[in-house]
Image: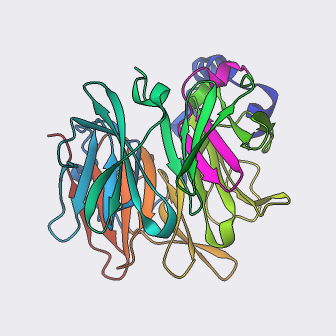
Amino acid sequence: MSRLYRIFPHGTVLLLGAALLLANFSIFGHVTAGEPTDKSIDPALFKRDQPTLLRVGEWDGRVVVEADRFYTLDLDRATAKPLELPGVEEIVGVATGERGKPFALCKTKGGHSLLVKEKDKWIEQELPDEVRKSRKPPRLTADAASVALLAEDKVYRLAAKKWTTISLTPRPEHLCMMHDARHVLLAGERMYLGYDSGEWGGGLLRLDLGTGKWEEIKLDDGHTPVHDLKSGPGGKVWTVEGLDHLGLMDGVVHSYDGKAWKMLCRSSKGDPENWDLPSASLAALAFDVKGNLWLLSGWLGLIRREKEKWVRVTPGWHDCQPVQSLHMTSSGVAVIGTLDAGVLLFEVESKRIRRVTLGK
């Protein structure tokens, strides 16, 4: 990441950037990640009139968007509609468990319920009483072996049709971690939390489900916001860290194979590693059905890894578009979640791009 951010972590970046801005506006006025060769993308696709989007992904055989509520996408029609389940007042979380089973955490008049789809029917799964009656919903996450509900000081884990309760040690307290974690990932006997507080920093925590102890994972300098956190081929854990604020531009991708963390690339301004494109912040990653890695950047658009090289895939992408999340479908459509301009559907082969609006 940038040398300035290493020296001045967290909110100091804001003050430093403001001082530099007053001293010499041209420092920021000429920041660029390279001009696209084709200015063909209609700026109207990025009209910022939609609810704030958190993430996109696949669930129950469909592409689901989490924003002000959950939506399902119709990729053929490029439309979205609210996700609804029979008899459910509000859906607060979705996850995919063993053999692709979809789970949904729902709010009810009496508290919360957990639904699981069995043979095309939604069945209510028994919940521990303190979860069912809790006012604040826990965070739902799952992997192929179990389902977990993360509360403030406990994890409730469902495996082999049996719930266990794990008491947790206090989480490390840092300024950058005062907000709720943006990402929660269950990976075997570990749970990961990714924090993203923008210019104030971020971090990565790992929970040992056997002991209930938290561990802070120091990626890079340990303060960079975690923009994405996912499981990849072979069960590896992948992270995207980044920052794009007042001329400071950082992007780093790490992976963990169960033994050691490895940095794949750094796209940071002035400090690149294993990166042959213009400097840019990075927002998200995804894998296609063949296991190929894709990255998303607000400056460069969609990026694909090809034989040890990075290739820009979206011609005509305009610089500095706020993007949040990425999902690659089996049919070759890149589902790009923007911050507040809805969803973009980019067809990799034809290069066609369409916008899906959500709440308006």
Residue 181 coordinates in the image, percent (x, y): 57, 33
Task: From the viewer's perspective, tell me whether residue 322 is left or right of residue 351.
Answer: right
- Please say if 298 is above or below 60: above
Residue at the spot 51% in from the left edge and 64% down from the top edge:
98
Residue 221 coordinates in the image, percent (x, y): 80, 38
In the image shown, does 276 or 179 lie closer to the viewer?
179
Give the residue at the far right of this rendering.
Answer: 259
In the image shown, does 171 or 45 lie closer to the viewer?
171
Q: Is residue 146 magenta?
A: no
The answer to whether residue 282 of the structure is visible from this angle is: no
Q: Does the magenta stretch include residue 179?
A: yes
Task: From the viewer's perspective, tell me whether residue 189 is left or right of residue 293.
Answer: right
Residue 271 coordinates in the image, percent (x, y): 77, 50
Residue at the spot 81% in from the left edge and 40% down from the top edge:
218
Task: From the viewer's perspective, tell me whether residue 259 is left or right of residue 28.
Answer: right
Specify the color scheme.
Answer: rainbow
Q: What stretch is highlighted in magenta?
A: 173-195
Residue at the spot 67% in from the left edge and 18% down from the top edge:
175
In the image shown, does 63 or 90 lie closer to the viewer?
90
Residue 164 coordinates in the image, percent (x, y): 62, 41
Residue at the spot 40% in from the left edge and 20% down from the top edge:
135
- Please say if 13 is above or below 62: above
Quadrant where the C terminus lies? top left
Quadrant where the N terminus lies? top right
Tally of numbered tags: 0
The answer to whether residue 103 of the structure is visible from this angle is: yes
Task: From the viewer's perspective, tell me whether residue 37 is left or right of residue 24.
Answer: left
Residue 75's image quarter? Answer: bottom left
